[in-house]
Image (spheres, rainbow, N blue to C red):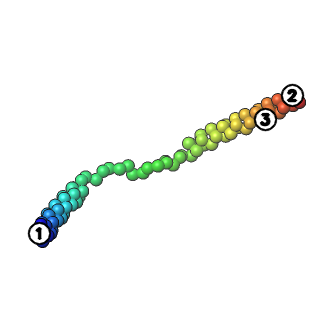
Amino acid sequence: MDLNKTLQDLYAEKERVERAIASLESLHKADRKEAPAVDRPGRRGRHAMGARERLEVSERMRRYWAARREGAGKAAEKLLTRTAGSS
């Protein structure tokens, strides 16, 4: 086995692989430059509410919390009547 011959073969193969990699990288860069830009919507996320929409949400939440308070009062009242009746 000739060590020098093996080293020469490996260096030659390394050069071929490096040239192939360089060629593929240049093709990849060229493809990326030619790709058309994708149209994206200008704005994402939440949209701003108008005054009328804010008023509707406000009224809806006011009714919601009033119903919650009423429901909580009824639940507490039921709890008190049960405990008072059982003693």
Spot the residue most to the right.
87
Closer to the eye: label 2 or 1 = 1
| Residue 85 tag number | 2
Q: Which residue is mark 1?
A: 2
Spot the residue most to the top.
85
Q: Pointer 3: residues within 10 angstroms few (<14), some, or many (20+)?
A: few
Q: Position of residue 61 (x, y in %)?
A: 64, 40
The mark that comes first in sequence, 2 or 3, is: 3
Q: Amino acid at mark 3?
A: Ala
Frontmost residue, 59 versus 75: 75
Q: Amino acid at mark 2?
A: Gly
Q: Position of residue 52 (x, y in %)?
A: 57, 43
The residue under the point 49% across, 48% down is 46
| Occupied quadrant, residue 81 | top right
Q: Which type of secondary structure does the marked residue at label 1 adopt? A: loop
Q: Pointer 1: residues within 10 angstroms few (<14), some, or many (20+)?
A: few
Q: Which type of secondary structure does the marked residue at label 2 adopt? A: helix
Q: Position of residue 49 (x, y in %)?
A: 53, 46
Q: Which residue is mark 3?
A: 76
Horizontal arrangement in the rendering, residue 12 relative to residue 71 (left or right): left
